[in-house]
Image (cartoon, coloured by chain):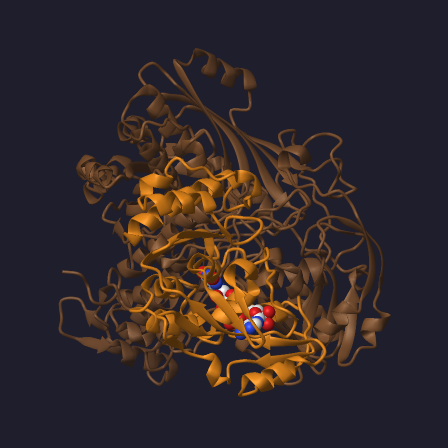
Chain colours: A orange, B brown
Amino acid sequence: MYSFEFEKPSTIAEAVAALGAEEAQALGGGQTLIPTLKQRLAAPAKLVSLSGIAELKGVCVEDDGALAIGGGTTHATVAREAADKYPALADLASHIGDPAVRNRGTIGGSLANNDPSACYPAAVLASGATIRTNSRDIAADDFFQGMFTTALADGEIITSVRFPVPQAANYQKFLQPASRFALVGVFVARFADGVRVAVTGASEDGVFRWTEAEQALSADFRPDAVKDLKVDPSGMIGDLHGSKEYRAHLVGVMTRRAVAAAG
Amino acid sequence: MPKDSGIGASSKRREDVRFLTGAGNYTDDINIHGQAYVYFLRSDIAHGRINSIDTADAEAMPGVVRVFTGADFEGVGGMPCGWQVTDRHGQPMQEPPHPILAQGKVRHVGDPIAAVVADSLEQARDAAEAIAFDIEELPAVVDMREAAKGGATKVHDDLTSNICYDWVLGETDDAKVDEVFQNAAHVTTLELTNNRLVANPMEPRVCVAEYSRGTDEYTLYTTSQNPHVIRLLMCAFVLGLPEHKVRVVAPDVGGGFGTKIFHYAEEAFCTFAAKACNRPVKWTASRSEAFMSDAQGRDHVTKIELALDSDNNFVGLRTDTLANMGAYLSTFSSSVPTWLHGTLMAGNYKTPVIQVNVKAIFTNTVPVDAYRGAGRPEATFQLERVIDKAARELGVDPIKLRRQNFITEFPYDTPVALTYDTGDYNGTMDKLEAAADIAGFPARRAESEARGKLRGLGVNCYIEACGIAPSNIVGMLGARAGLYDAATVRVNATGTISVMVGAHSHGQGHETAFPQVVAEMIGIDESMVEIVHGDTSKIPFGMGTYGSRSLAVCGSAMVRATEKIINKAKKIAAHLLEASEADIELKDGQFTVAGTDKSVAWGDVTLTAYVPHNFPLEDIEPGLEETAFYDPANFTFPAGAYACEVEVDPETGKVTIERFTAADDFGNIVNPMIVDGQVHGGIGQGIGQALLENCVYDENGQLLSASYMDYAMPRADDVPFYTVDHSSQTPCTHNPLGVKGCGEAGAIGSPPAVVNAVIDALQSGGKTVDHIDMPVSPSRVWAAMNG
Ligand SMILES: Cc1cc2nc3c(=O)[nH]c(=O)nc-3n(C[C@H](O)[C@H](O)[C@H](O)COP(=O)(O)OP(=O)(O)OC[C@H]3O[C@@H](n4cnc5c(N)ncnc54)[C@H](O)[C@@H]3O)c2cc1C
């Protein structure tokens, strides 16, 4: 680690002000950022911890029934508090990393980081969620812009994420055996007006919507509806854990399983 | 009735109390007043020529004590190799220098270019970033097959090629071997890879070194499995220090698995720097450093051919192996693919003609050396995979084919230089078939199929040569060290006993098991006996722990020393009881005159030894302390049969292990619970190799699996509950305890069982696949099913 300054504000406004400084960076749960710092792969001049900001934390139901989760809410809290409101989302949160990661890592940190194998991006994209920041609302479809890239501007803080709650949903995660991130993860969400399918772990462009499957499932929400659909391997990730072809194949398998489990 | 103490009792591991309550004393727990910290600047390219290194800016950084480069070690020895292999033409292997810090070239990612000693670790790291160097990148030699070709880029410019040695064992006349294969009714051939592994002990390597100007003495605390070996190698071959001025301490060590046997450059560096800087120095490897500097394991590519006659008897075996040495020869690297591998190719079978060919190859990768099993897992894997394939091709039951070819008479001289003293392979297989309920497999398969899963059964045998080993034999084979061990039994005046042993416990439970033996021999409570290990200033010159040798070799020394103690104690007892020594019997800690009720207790005799008021001083010396060195007559030969049942998900290719059964013959057993634990751990590592672990370099020699994000260690939910059966027992014929060793068996026996089971599962799904290389990952299984 290189040395840096440290601030721990207690309001969003203070945090935004602190992040205005040269080379300042937000610190969520630190589960991604701290290892990066320890390896000296990043050298922020100042870290602004978001963990002391009460208004960034918690899970609540909004008037229209959507679920709002504070940007600083840990995975463990989501797993616990969203369980009866959005079980598929809570289940996803309960399978991120290990207890230490779940009790420190936050939804805001996960989305801001946009790891191509992370779980939350699939839920956010499949739910058609809205990412709220200190300055605007960003639709999920506009937020994810490729591996480790998002629509966030420098110093912009994810304050909450608003999830419309689907009628039925499920997340299927096929584990990368070492990291236990998603080798391929598929989140299927069925709304009154159609089905959304988001895939993580598979593509070189990060999380994406599988539109052919969405169309097929919107017409017929059964695993068989997608059994003949194929994903083109060419844009998939190929690495020591699985070839492009294998990932493309798994997208189909995980989608069918998610549909079956969503019921 | 199971015993509750002494030999055969499952005494609870007394060392666990301190390990589990945070009271252990590991090397990193040791801090010496005024210590400075070492940071190694390591190469981030696999192969390069060092044009210049400029340390001036680094030297001027805050807190920096001194910056070292290879130039500071001109005239100092390099890291030695402890085993000289002689090639097929009688020539010694090619043995390139291995400097403490790189000189001239860097040869793998992680090769140390420079070392900074500073007041704090962060200051040392900052300074390392200020070192200016010009290293011209050279093409990396990564693939062994390419490296072995003439004209390939050379890892070491001064060698004639990248081939360390080209070695043969067994039948050296090619024509004779060819004839066997030409006359065979059936030949089965298999090409396979034994995947490279990173040992990954929980505790990374650490060194703390201190030098006293007043006494000219050095102390090195280090994470080692064999402190005396480190002291000898470092003093005699590297730094040229007098051994009596150097103390090496290996305190609690958090796992070794082989990778902490070797003498590492960091140990020599820290010892050297402690004097050069006149300050204690400390180095603690980060996990990333462990991935690129701990010697790695396995990494063989093999073609194996098995010839059978028309009655399915094995008539010939031929293997061709390329073994990766990495960039330098680590301490025992050269012996692993040869004397620890080729010699095991007979397995449990009476194959009359065997030829083993091994080429050891230098590449721009981290050095490879012994890892749990060392050579024997590689041998077992090839042999048991090719037998399985032969059974499939011939349509015979794989267990029957094995049984038909078992060695049944002992002692048995194999065609590959070993003499098996004893064993009962059919008996062990009987135990396996019962414990694994092989007969019930078809019903379990049907149940899996009803759930849409493919189920496979894999069975295999293994044999290993342990208790390494007779010094005269290993010396003949090229070892540059003796491989005896030593123990000193010091009886205290009150009757308690300290046993100073050359073996080192780093997870094996010696602190519990060794006292069980001494307590049993004397008939006293186990709690009265304690072992002392890991400190050259306290223990006799023993060779440490690896190769499942501790109890078989060091335990035997301890038995011999305890026998000397008992003999002397009997003399003292005879004097006290005014009887003839020949009439004294020792039982339950009481010395009795045979046939009388005259007796004297152990504690009275030991007190007399140290308070010799009434003592036969004219016959014997006072005191009660004896040392024995023990050099065995042969290796020991643990053997067993393993069965694995897997389920394969046909949609994803994911393999799950449903049942795993081990039937081992370890000879006599001192602590069954510890033996179970050793087998469980070994199988866990074997399953790790078979399903998960893979150390991968890209074509530029960059380590792709350089952290736990990409190197998959087995977790609790990757392994099943094991069934282990150790009731097949043919005691070793040549050591006093009749023990064989159990530390490596699990890791040796389990990988082929897993792969055999996967192949069987695919077959049941209608897909005949000859082989899938380890790790048998979902992606590979899926590719094989759809290939
Ligand atoms: C062992 C391990 C296993 C894991 N397994 C999984 C897994 O299975 N699935 C998975 O999805 N993830 C996994 N993770 C990642 C984990 O979910 C992290 O918590 C998450 O990616 C980052 O969240 P954080 O709060 O820790 O963010 P930090 O590490 O603190 O920050 C990450 C990035 O986000 C920025 N940031 C943080 N909070 C905000 C905010 N509110 N607004 C804007 N920017 C912000 C930071 O500046 C930084 O750039 C794992 C991590 C570990 C260490």
Residue at the image point whose x is 67% and y is 84% from the top: B34
Q: Position of residue B602 (x, y in %)?
A: 27, 76
Please state the total of marks drawn on the protein image: 0
Q: Quadrant of the N terminus of chain B?
A: bottom left
In the rendered view, does B267 fall on the left or right side of B4?
Answer: right
In the rendered view, does A40 fall on the left or right side of B225?
Answer: right
Residue at the image point whose x is 37% and y is 63% from the top: A89
Residue at the image point whose x is 53% and y is 39% from the top: A233
Q: Quadrant of residue B316?
A: top left
In the rendered view, does B104 fall on the left or right side of B685?
Answer: right
In the rendered view, does B189 fall on the left or right side of B217?
Answer: left
Q: Where B174 falls versus B649 (above or below)?
A: above
Q: Position of residue B498 (x, y in %)?
A: 40, 74
Q: Position of residue B121 (x, y in %)?
A: 67, 76
Q: Position of residue B258 (x, y in %)?
A: 50, 55
Residue B771 visible, this angle = yes
Residue farthest to the top, as pictured: B183
In the image, A185 versus B758, the foreground residue is A185
Q: Quadrant of residue B247?
A: bottom right
In the image, A106 versus B212, the foreground residue is A106
Q: Quadrant of residue B622?
A: bottom left
Q: Quadrant of the C terminus of chain B?
A: top left
In the image, B216 versus B38, the foreground residue is B38
Residue B202 visible, this angle = no
